[in-house]
């Protein structure tokens, strides 16, 4: 997974510790701790995972294993408009791959990347539970259903003039 | 206990509740193939992710096939282990596993001892139909001084994870990613060298493929042997002689000391010496340190920290430097036998031989992979010239001998060279769990009490197979309390007791590998058969029992070494050549947690 190096400030560390404490330092709470930490920081760089590892007494390798297993977690900051393409089974068989290719072309981004201006990021996810709408694309919290490659330009244009 | 009746391949049997189909079949002599599954019975170590699906069987009334390694028997179950459906499924699964596996078997370091290769042969795989749709992962090769990770060859059996996390509690490895990209790596895909890895090598010992192998130094050794400028001497660790025979088809537990010596001499080593000599030397220094700490403690010196911990196992040293840096003043400062040998060889012996340090090459043959790393530590170098140049494993020595067309079975018995080849029974038992502390006890008893043990040199209470053992030895009215742990997970428990101030031991022996060095990461692969380790241990005790001298302080060449060169145990010269210091390698301090 691509990653960025950060230098954590003491109040960042304190925040992580606070989240771990709220979960009673339970190793079994790792996923919930990661969720909350990502919600706060926006992403989970190695340095943050390392602190969580010490606090929950779970090896850093295991923390990284969980972060890389679930597509929800990211080690790079997401864009202000994170674009996600569902590549779960239903979306996949209904052409998500072609939609994804078109988005890559339009945004000039690979999966897992964030644009230099920090506006867009691109990721794949597995099943948002809206298989009836397959293939599904998300931009932030907004869901687009039955997306065809030809629709991609129109979707992106909605965000063109936004900051 | 509840029992369960079932039928496997038309044979009825009764098994205790909780037994898996795989184990039930084994009782009937039916050998269901397993790949990811691994079991070390004596230590309750089991790896059964049920992931590879090679061990599937047909269960009547169940629509899909069941993984026999992780499916428990049920009353009235009717199991078939070799129907056409089962055999086809196994082969198909195998074809899928092979579809994204690199195909460089001819030059792969694991070729010939690869579980994956053996399974492909056993299941009769003749083609790999799905190759075109598979994606071989493209992770970089990670080379450390001891272990090489070529994780494109990882088949996700997760045996290494079981050893690293559950048994050793080191936590260096974890499965990451998904699908074709899923492999086992350290955190953030960092190099092993940057990770908490101790190089104990237990992951290498159980890896079914070449995803994890040892760093091979045989080419460097051959080059040194063929250089006329170099005086090349070799030392062999105690556990090697009790296992090398297995690589040449001998029974586990065969002692091949004499044959190994003649093989090394034929390979061209100028002197064939014994690490056991240095083990005796370790006992003199470590024994003196134990007595010194005990006496000072008895005299009320509050600066003395007890228990004292043994320090000859480099995997263990790496472990406490990373996981318990606050305890780094507790272990003995005595260097390991490998390193004591190296520093004595390149000073005392080099001077005796009139060979310049840079023209002497010291090779060690070790049951261990952590020794490779230890030999490259900066503390054990003089002007960047290491005391031990190359450390090769038991397996590498076997390879070297085979390359040089030697068959161990047919070699005569020969004796080690003198002076650094002479050792006592105490030096030999270093190779098995409990051995170092028994050797130390033999010497410490006599020095402390001033009485001779005569023939009663064995301390049965220190021997055994449990992961953590406690024993007491009567030192003529003073009771010496001893703790023993093998396997780092067990060591961790004793260390936590020390941290909490609950430890009541005077001395603790710790070996990183289950069984001690006989179960080291560089030994012939035991493929999960723990009885092999017991036989190696018995062989070690046999060698001890057959020795004329069985106490380290009675080794005449050790006495000579102190008289001619070192002076007193714990003296200035001894301190400079035979002792070391430890470092805090924890990453915790970076984060001020």
Image (tube, rainbow, N blue to C red):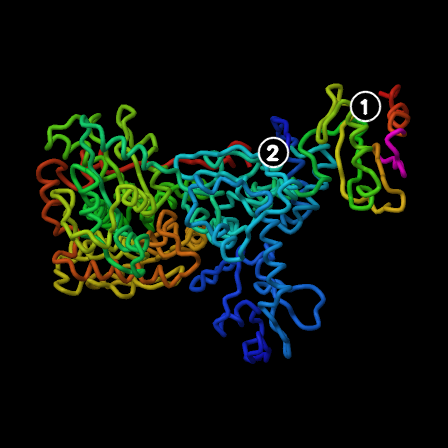
Coordinates of residue B64 in the picture (x, y in percent):
69, 64
The secondary element bearing badge 1 is classed as helix
**B591 in relation to B287, above or below:** above
Return the chain for callout 2: A
In the picture of the structure, the residue carrying the numbered disc 1 is A106
The reply to whether the magenta stretch includes residue B526 is: no
Q: Is residue B437 visible?
A: yes
Count how many numbered circles sit on residues in the image. Answer: 2
Quarter of the image with the N terminus of chain A is top right
**B325 in relation to B429, above or below:** above
Return the chain for callout 1: A
In the picture of the structure, the residue carrying the numbered disc 2 is A46
Q: Are marks 2 and 1 on the same chain?
A: yes
| Residue placed most toward the observer, A130 or A102 | A102
Q: Which residues are magenta?
A: A141-150
Identify which residue is drawn at 65% across, 49% down. A24
Lower position in the chain sequence, tag 2 or tag 1: 2
Q: Is residue B302 visible?
A: no
Q: CA distance from mark 2 to mark 1?
A: 30 Å
Coordinates of residue B519 in the picture (x, y in percent):
36, 54
Q: Would residue B20 appear left or right of B178 to someone viewing this image?
A: left
Q: Would residue B547 appear left or right of A47 to someone viewing this image?
A: left
| Residue placed most toward the observer, B465 or B138 | B138
| Residue placed most toward the observer, B73 or B424 | B73
Report which quarter residue B235 is drawn in.
top left
Coordinates of residue A129 in the picture (x, y in percent):
84, 47
Q: Residues within 10 Å of mark 2 (few under 14, many from 20)?
A: many
């Amino acid at each position: 997974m691509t990653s960025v190096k950060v230098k954590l400030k003491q109040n960042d560390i304190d925040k992580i510790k606070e989240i771990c404490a709220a979960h009673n330092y339970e190793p079994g709470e790792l996923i919930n701790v990661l969720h909350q930490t990502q919600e706060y920081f926006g992403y989970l760089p190695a340095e943050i995972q390392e602190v969580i590892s010490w606090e929950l007494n779970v090896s850093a390798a295991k923390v990284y294993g969980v972060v890389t297993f679930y597509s929800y977690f990211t080690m790079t900051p997401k864009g202000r408009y994170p674009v996600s393409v569902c590549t779960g089974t239903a979306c996949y068989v209904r052409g998500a791959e072609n939609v994804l290719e078109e988005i890559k072309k339009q945004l000039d981004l690979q999966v897992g990347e964030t644009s230099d201006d920090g506006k867009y990021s691109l990721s794949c996810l597995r099943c948002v539970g809206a298989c009836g709408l397959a293939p599904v694309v998300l931009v932030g919290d907004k869901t687009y259903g039955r997306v065809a490659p030809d629709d991609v330009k129109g979707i992106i244009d909605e965000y063109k003039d936004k900051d | 206990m509840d029992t369960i009746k079932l039928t496997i391949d038309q044979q009825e049997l009764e098994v205790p509740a909780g037994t898996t189909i795989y184990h039930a079949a084994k009782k009937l002599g039916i050998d269901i193939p397993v790949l990811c599954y691994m079991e070390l019975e004596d230590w309750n170590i089991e790896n059964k992710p049920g992931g590879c699906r090679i061990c599937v069987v047909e269960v009547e009334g169940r629509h899909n096939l069941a993984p026999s390694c992780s499916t428990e028997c049920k009353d009235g179950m009717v199991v078939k282990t070799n129907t056409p459906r089962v055999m086809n499924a196994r082969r198909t699964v195998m074809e899928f596993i092979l579809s994204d596996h690199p195909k460089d078997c001819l030059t792969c370091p694991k070729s010939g001892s690869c579980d994956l290769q053996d399974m492909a042969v056993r299941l009769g795989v003749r083609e790999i139909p799905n190759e075109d749709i598979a994606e071989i992962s493209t992770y970089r090769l990670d080379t450390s001084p001891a272990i090489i990770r070529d994780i494109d060859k990882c088949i996700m059996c997760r045996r290494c994870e079981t050893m690293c996390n559950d048994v050793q509690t080191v936590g260096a490895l974890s499965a990451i990613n998904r699908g074709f990209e899923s492999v086992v790596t350290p955190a953030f895909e960092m190099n092993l060298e940057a990770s908490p890895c101790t190089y104990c090598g237990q992951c290498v010992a159980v890896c079914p493929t070449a995803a994890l192998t040892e760093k091979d130094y045989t080419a460097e050794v051959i080059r040194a042997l063929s250089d006329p400028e170099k005086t090349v001497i070799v030392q062999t660790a105690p556990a090697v002689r009790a296992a090398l025979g297995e690589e040449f088809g001998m029974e586990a537990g065969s002692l091949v000391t004499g044959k190994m010596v003649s093989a090394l001499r034929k390979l061209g080593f100028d002197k064939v010496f014994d690490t056991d000599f240095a083990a005796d030397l370790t006992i003199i220094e470590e024994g003196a340190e134990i007595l010194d700490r005990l006496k000072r403690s008895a005299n009320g010196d509050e600066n003395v920290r007890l228990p004292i911990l043994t320090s000859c196992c480099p995997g263990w040293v790496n472990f406490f430097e990373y996981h318990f840096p606050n305890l780094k003043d507790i272990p003995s400062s005595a260097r390991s036998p490998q390193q004591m040998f190296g520093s004595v060889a390149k000073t005392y012996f080099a001077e005796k031989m009139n060979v310049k340090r840079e023209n002497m090459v010291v090779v060690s043959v070790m049951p261990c992979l952590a020794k490779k790393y230890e030999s490259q530590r900066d503390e054990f170098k003089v002007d960047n010239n290491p005391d031990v140049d190359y450390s090769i494993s038991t397996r590498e020595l076997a390879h070297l001998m085979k390359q040089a067309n030697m068959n161990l079975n047919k070699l005569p018995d020969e004796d080690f060279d003198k002076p650094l080849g002479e050792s006592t029974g105490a030096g030999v038992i270093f190779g098995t769990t409990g051995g170092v502390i028994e050797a130390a006890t033999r010497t410490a008893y006599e020095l402390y009490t001033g009485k001779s043990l005569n023939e009663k040199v064995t301390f049965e209470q220190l021997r055994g197979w449990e992961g953590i053992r406690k024993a007491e030895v009567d030192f003529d009215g003073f009771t010496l309390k001893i703790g023993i742990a093998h396997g780092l997970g067990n060591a961790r428990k004793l260390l936590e007791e020390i941290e909490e101030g609950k430890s009541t031991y005077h001395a603790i022996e710790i070996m990183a590998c289950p069984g001690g060095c006989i179960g080291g990461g560089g030994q012939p692969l035991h493929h999960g058969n723990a009885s092999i380790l017991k036989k190696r241990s018995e062989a070690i005790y046999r060698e001890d029992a057959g020795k004329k001298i069985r106490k380290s302080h009675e080794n005449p060449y050790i006495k000579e070494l102190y008289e001619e060169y070192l002076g007193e145990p714990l003296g200035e010269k001894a301190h400079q050549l035979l002792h070391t210091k430890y470092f805090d390698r924890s990453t915790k301090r970076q984060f001020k947690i």
